Amino acid sequence: MRSGYWLGIVAAAFVAGWATGRGGHRESGKETAEVPVRERAALQRDERGKSAAQWAEELRGRDNDGLKSFGREIPRAELGPAIEKWIASHGVGGLGNEGRARLRILLGDWAERDFEGVRNWADGLGDPVIREMALTALAAALAEKDPERAFECLAANGEFHQDLMGHHSLYELMRKLSADAIAEGPEAFAALWSRLPVGKSSMETASGFDVSLGDDVDFVAYADALRKIREMGRHPIYPGGVMKEWAKRDAEAATEYVLEAGLSGRVHYEWWELGQVIEQERGLREVGGWTVEMLRRVPEERRAEFFLNAGMLGAPERVLGADQEYYQPGEKEALARDMLQGAAKRGWWEWGKILEAVEPERRMEVLLQVRGAESVGDLQSYLEGQGYAAERIEEVIAVVRRPKE
């Protein structure tokens, strides 16, 4: 907290109290950022009587070329509140790409003059969404010239509400820092990403980037490091590409890793990256055959578990959509059964999507082999949509709910 800024608030509150006859009280131990925005805007005035809200309104009307000079026109005590008011004025939708670019200009210029001041202001904002906007914009502004301070701002954010899509400079920042860490080894790489906070459980990470690896690489160590990073939670941006590079150099070793790791934990990204390389090298038609062949190497009694860990239930066509010539007799139906068994364990909506990939006359036969279903709402909806009588639906649900032997 900056003493000059706090004294300005106290003085303004004192004057406002005498002028209106309604003096206010504030606890001296409170951080400036905890004062509500509308109260701060009403209290804070520069020597000409211009409020933070007025400065924010003027800011809206300035073009990007004039933002730096305008930011320097605003008295230091008013700069933070004016920017905060301007951010808040954009409402629920947030700043958008253009607004984020303008914020980077403002905060970047402020950082050149007083990094500690702008960092403390951003870190002390009371609204967590506005605070995140400010810290990520400050990080983006510093990314090229001062990557360590930029990462420090990201690390200070805490739990992210949104991913970093749209912040190209932050992608490049994490790419550069990852390359530096990789030069030191997989432990340093994992340590770097462990410092970047994850997002809320509702946050969807839209995209990431592929890391660059050297010629002499311990792929197992880096694949393990990436899995540990992903186990931390959903980062606002994610690193990848290790499995792609490994598959290009040694597809058999990469495949063996995924098959083994998928029996003990999540391998969503690994599975998809591996499949991407196979598709690029062999063509889309061959991917189905390769998938079926690979799944024969998974113990039958553990295939449902593997389907879950590899995130394959969301795209059953990758398993059940291969040309018929790739399947041995009864193999497609067995794979469908195991996919349904995985869906039964999690209660996911893929019931219908999986059944649709099976020949109509075989669907009920396959479905009735499932056991231990924990949630059947989606299955019931699917069967109702297929026109099954209520009595028959009850019979089917009773069967799939039986404990797995």
Image (cartoon, rainbow, N blue to C red):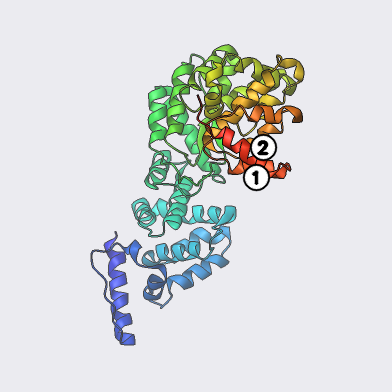
Answer yes or no: is residue 355 visible.
yes
Residue 332, labelled with which disc?
Answer: none
Pick out the residue farthest to the front.
Answer: 391
Tell which of 48 and 277 is nearer to you: 277
Give the quarter of the image for residue 128.
Answer: bottom left
Residue 352, labelled with which disc?
Answer: 2
Tell which of 389 and 148 is nearer to you: 389
- Check if mark 1's residue and mark 2's residue have beta carbons within 8 Å: yes
Give the quarter of the image for residue 275.
Answer: top right
Say which quadrant the N terminus sits in.
bottom left
> Is disc 1 placed on a helix, strand or loop?
helix
Q: Vertically, is 145 above or below 130?
A: above
Q: Vertically, is 198 above or below 329?
A: below
**Which of the two discs, 1 and 2, labels the residue nearer the N terminus?**
2
Residue picked out by circle 1: 381
The type of residue carrying mark 2 is Gly
Answer yes or no: is residue 359 visible.
no
Tell which of 25 and 322 is nearer to you: 322
> Residue at coordinates 40% horizontally, 75% vertically from top-left?
42
Tell which of 31 and 299 is nearer to you: 299
Q: How many marks?
A: 2
Q: Residue 358 placed where, x, y %?
A: 72, 28
Density class for disc 2 (Cα within 10 Å; few <14, some 14-19, many ≥20) is some
Q: Residue 207 placed where, x, y %?
A: 57, 38
